[in-house]
Image (tube, grey):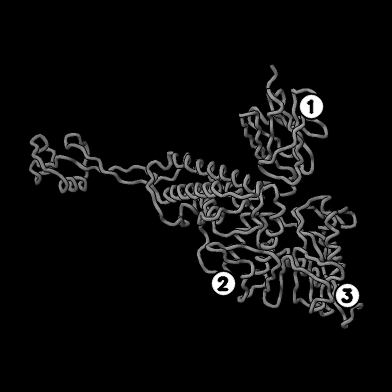
Amino acid sequence: MDELQLVLLDAASMREICTVWPGKCICEPGTIEETKTYLFELRNPPDSLKAHLFIDDQRLKRDILDTPLRIQWEWNIEFHAGEIEILLQLGNKAIRRTLVTDPDRRKLTRDQFDTMVRQILNDTFALLSLSSYKFRVARGNAVEFPPIARLEFLRSQIDELETVLRAIDKNPVRILRSTMDTLPFHKVRQLTSPELIKSFTRGKIVQSHEARDRLPKALDGRLPASIYKARKNPGLDIQEHRDMKFVLKSWSSWLSLIADLLAGTSTEDRELSAQRKKWALRCRAMSRRLDSLLKLPLFQEVQDSRKPVLATQIYLRVPLYGQFLTIYNNFQHAIANITGDFLQVPLARTYNLYEVWAFLRLARAASILFPDPDFRPDSLFKMDGRSIVVSPSQICFDFGKQLRLCFQRTYREFWIEKDGRGTYSRFMRPDFAIETSVQRDDEQNILLILDAKYRVETGLNEALSSIHMYRDALVCREDNSDYDIGRIVTGAYLITPDIYVTHTDWKDLKLPARLFHPEYRSHFRFGAVTMRPGITDDEVVALLKAIIDDCSK
């Protein structure tokens, strides 16, 4: 009988890419590409009508071929980078597999998704520290479950935590500790003066005629019945290991509570209900993984502790311990009671996070480039019970009189706006609008329009129409005339994770590479800039300063 197996095929060439089941599902990096279509093919199923396939809990459309020995499911990958869960149901039997994809290396992979969420959390805390909200937030309350993007982030942190702790378990830092051994005096071959004095003060004294000649005359043959000898033993009970044990227990408990909360909530929304059920199972699985780490030999002789985790010398000097401290800080941020609708997206819809990440990066860079002691980003946050909700919708930050950064600002028709600045067609809402007080020769303020696009290569060509539209349609009334208008947009740029090398003359480059050339951007005040997760504060500051300088000439 032929073997029952599930394989992945390229829909265009019908080339077999990998075997999903049986065995481990391993797909070579770069073989699965965005916007392409693939086929899962089940060969030799026992009952075709009872076979169903789910990708991240979404059922795929089944196609039974001419022969009942093959079933195919079409999978259009669209935007997807990272880990997907495959569930194959064969009647009462359920088979689960995990497939890690990296569809487009020029876009955001799983690691970059984690970096993006980490930077969103870090920037949120940095901006929150500048606001008037002054209370502790770096702790989850297990009353409301974290947004999905943060749960995805936590799962990756547990993967890294498991690797780090198992490496520490193989070569842990030890400390020498003294222990006291109690021996009868006739078994002791060597004895120091401090050990003899301590033994005299602690136990019964006996008379030994045999040892009289070997003892000092002052003792007159008297000896302790038991000798207490100090012995140095390398031990694992140090504060750093106590920290690890404590956080593993607390995180495991927190994940278990979140799982119960997710499983216990009901909703009429079927998609949301299925999503919560899925994450309840995942949180319980993560909790079990943390519990299994507590069974490592590393923690067998380590006492319980509830002290705060501080950056000790071991954390700073031993690389593996430093990695644990970084994971700890990331995890604490991820379970903090800070929420936001923009975080309610799975890894497969990373593009929903990208524009918020870019805004927080730009806001933090602007606060560095234009420091203002009176800057208060309170409009970014609002209270919801015991949680802080991040709401980056249609808000503006003023950095003194030097710069204003707006997120999704709405421009209405110019004749109904008080300042006469708006659009002459429909309402427009660009992702970011930057107004600066830097003066040009014509003594007009600079208005920059930035549009975040989670696209690469030819997809950027299609996105050009949006910044062309903003540049042409945003105007201001001149001389109080409805027919005498002028453009107000000084420069328009796309923000994208794509990267291009632009060493040649910009006239020799094709789109979209031409958009990234510094001379092209400076001359036309139009183009694209690269922002990828992992970009540092200094790099964002340099990017922001460069486009402002280009438009100030």
C-alpha separation, residue under disc 2 versus residue under disc 3: 40 Å
What residue did someone put label 1 on? 65
Residue annotated with mark 2: 132
Report which residue position mark 3 lands on. 486
Disc 3 marks a residue whose amino acid type is Gly
Can you say which quadrant of the picture contains the N terminus?
A: top right
Q: Earlier in the sequence, mark 2 or mark 3?
A: 2
Which residue sits at x=68%, y=54%? 533
From the viewer's perspective, is 296 left or right of 345? left
- Mark 1 and mark 3 residues within 8 Å of each other at the beta carbon: no
Instruction: State the residue at coordinates (83%, 74%).
Output: 414
Question: Is residue 428 at all visible to an observer of this figure?
Answer: yes
Point out the residue furthest to the right here.
483
> Residue 553, can we see it?
no
**Mark 1 or 2, closer to the camera:** 1
Badge 1: residue crowd in 10 Å (few <14, some 14–19, many ≥20): few
Distance from the alpha carbon under mark 1 to that under mark 3:
63 Å
**Depth order, front residue of 342/459:** 342
- Where residue 48 appears, as percent x and y from the top left, is 71, 26
